[in-house]
Image: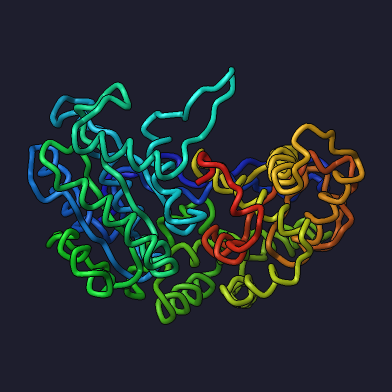
């Protein structure tokens, strides 16, 4: 049922230094995601692939709308289908195509979608006296309109099909109705122009979004629609064990995974939350085991249903939003920096990131917000970032694993500053929850196009 998957699973490395010689110290590499097939979504993958192959053969139907509750594999299915299409492209079975994504949750304003798309097409703005200036959204829209109506040469491969995934489309449209519907109309209208090579796949949580839009938009979304049903309890359990892999599954009591499965299936069927809950429960359990002085106690210990239940309470969206609202401004910037590092790590099939990565991100965001483009940020600010990280750990928004761990209690502030660079940090909530809570923050609005 799982089909071809990426080999290797969840990689764990053991480190026995500073732990008494008996406590293996697993370093989380990644809750792996299969790249070729996804359990329980084979039919949907075939549907998306059939649609894409039709577009590459010249089908006039070049829009698809995918809906379903969060965490049911909508985005993962499209990416999986694209990966399989890329294999076919490499074998010469389908024509050349390009693929890019725009996420409505992270777009600062609807009109910036024009400049993001143009940027991802390879257009880097205009040069003036040695400096490069980003195009205004109106100018970006004009260039895109010229490209998709007359195939003007903006990139080197104007004859190849461009597949655009508009993810979280309802967040883009429903929050800024008039401006966003204009942007969405342009994107969809470009797909039906004669000779246009644009294909749009829209993803949203709202099942009836087309009916809630203007009639001219609903008509352009076409008849290619897929509704993702929530996962059943058995499917959640199957996918969760698949994602954990044998290396991590062995640390969980059967009733712990069963509790997570039942809770998630009853509430939403969101696999992302199920994985995040198990990751958080594992991280807390691992730190607790490393403080144990009794080897037999460690060997007999496994992640229990109580551990999972505590992780569920800490990682509900409302708890995450409430915790973030209580942070100071600088702590929110540090959290956003960590969230971006976590997102980048996941793209590289990892789960952890280091302090220097957070610090580099923080410096960029802090300078943008304060206008101190060329100022040197001092050690006092670095120490504030360190204290902010410890505060985020105490709020369970972050977790850390330190090779030089000396018995500190979970969430405490007792990591020595000199050992901070050795810590691996893990983001506990999913990125969407953090992005939603920080969407109104000035630093979020100033994210670059590469971050979006």
Instruction: Please indicate, yes or no, whether residue 15 appears anywhere in the rendered image.
Output: no
> How far from the left and from the top, in percent, is residue 16?
75, 42
Q: How many marks?
A: 0
Towards the viewer: 417 or 243: 417
> How far from the left and from the top, in percent, is residue 266?
41, 81
Identify the image quadrant of residue 335: bottom right
Q: What's the residue at 55%, 57% (across, down)?
A: 431
> How far from the left and from the top, in percent, is residue 171?
42, 65
* Drawn side of residue 365 relative to residue 65, left or right: right
Residue sticking out furthest to the top = 130
Quadrant of the image containing the N terminus: bottom left
Identify the image quadrant of residue 251: bottom right
Q: What's the residue at 19%, 32% (across, down)?
A: 150
Instruction: State the scheme by which the image is colored.
Output: rainbow
Instruction: Please indicate, yes or no, whether residue 271 appears anywhere in the rendered image.
Output: yes
State whether residue 220 is above or below residue 36.
below
* Drawn side of residue 431 relative to residue 22, left or right: left
* Drawn side of residue 124 relative to residue 285, left or right: left
State whether residue 301 is above or below residue 191.
below
Q: What's the residue at 92%, 45% (across, down)?
A: 380
* Drawn side of residue 313 relative to residue 204, left or right: right
> How far from the left and from the top, in percent, is residue 96?
21, 28
């Amino acid at each position: 049922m799982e089909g071809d998957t990426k080999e290797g699973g969840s990689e764990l490395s053991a480190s026995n230094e500073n732990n008494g010689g008996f406590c293996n110290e697993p370093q989380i590499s990644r809750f792996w995601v299969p790249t070729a097939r996804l359990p329980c979504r084979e039919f949907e993958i075939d549907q998306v692939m059939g649609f894409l192959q039709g577009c590459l053969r010249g089908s006039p139907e070049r829009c698809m709308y995918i809906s379903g509750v969060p965490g049911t594999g909508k985005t993962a299915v499209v990416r999986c289908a694209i990966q399989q299409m890329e294999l076919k492209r490499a074998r010469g079975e389908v024509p050349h195509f390009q693929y890019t994504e725009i996420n409505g949750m992270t777009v600062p304003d609807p009109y910036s979608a024009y400049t993001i798309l143009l940027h991802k097409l390879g257009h880097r703005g205009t040069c003036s006296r040695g400096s490069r200036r980003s195009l205004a959204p109106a100018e970006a829209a004009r260039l895109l309109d010229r490209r998709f109506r007359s195939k003007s040469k903006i990139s080197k491969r104007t004859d190849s099909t461009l597949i655009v995934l508009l993810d979280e489309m309802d967040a883009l449209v429903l929050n800024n109705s008039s401006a966003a519907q204009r942007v969405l109309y342009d994107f969809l209208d470009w797909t039906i122009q004669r000779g246009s090579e644009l294909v749009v796949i829209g993803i949203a949580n709202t099942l009836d979004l087309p009916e809630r839009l203007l009639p001219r938009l609903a008509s352009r979304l076409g008849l290619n629609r897929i509704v993702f049903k929530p996962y059943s309890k058995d499917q959640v359990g199957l996918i969760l064990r698949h994602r954990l892999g044998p290396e991590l599954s062995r640390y969980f009591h059967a009733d712990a995974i069963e509790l997570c499965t039942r809770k998630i299936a009853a509430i939403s069927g969101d696999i992302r939350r199920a994985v995040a809950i198990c990751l958080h429960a594992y991280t807390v359990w691992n730190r607790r085991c490393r403080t144990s002085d009794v080897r037999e106690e460690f060997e007999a210990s496994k992640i229990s249903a109580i551990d999972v239940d505590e992780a569920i309470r800490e990682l509900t969206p409302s708890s995450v939003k409430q915790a973030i609202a209580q942070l100071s401004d600088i702590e929110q910037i540090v959290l956003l920096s960590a969230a971006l590092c976590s997102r980048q790590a996941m793209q590289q099939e990892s789960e952890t990131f280091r302090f220097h990565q957070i610090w580099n991100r923080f410096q960029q965001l802090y300078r943008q917000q304060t206008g101190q483009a060329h100022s040197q940020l001092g050690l006092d600010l670095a120490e504030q970032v360190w204290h902010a990280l410890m505060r985020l750990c105490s709020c369970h928004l972050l977790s850390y694993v330190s090779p030089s761990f000396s018995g500190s209690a979970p969430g405490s502030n007792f990591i020595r500053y000199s050992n901070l660079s050795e810590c691996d940090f893990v983001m506990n909530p999913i990125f969407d929850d953090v992005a939603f809570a920080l969407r109104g923050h000035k630093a979020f609005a100033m994210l670059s196009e590469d971050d979006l």
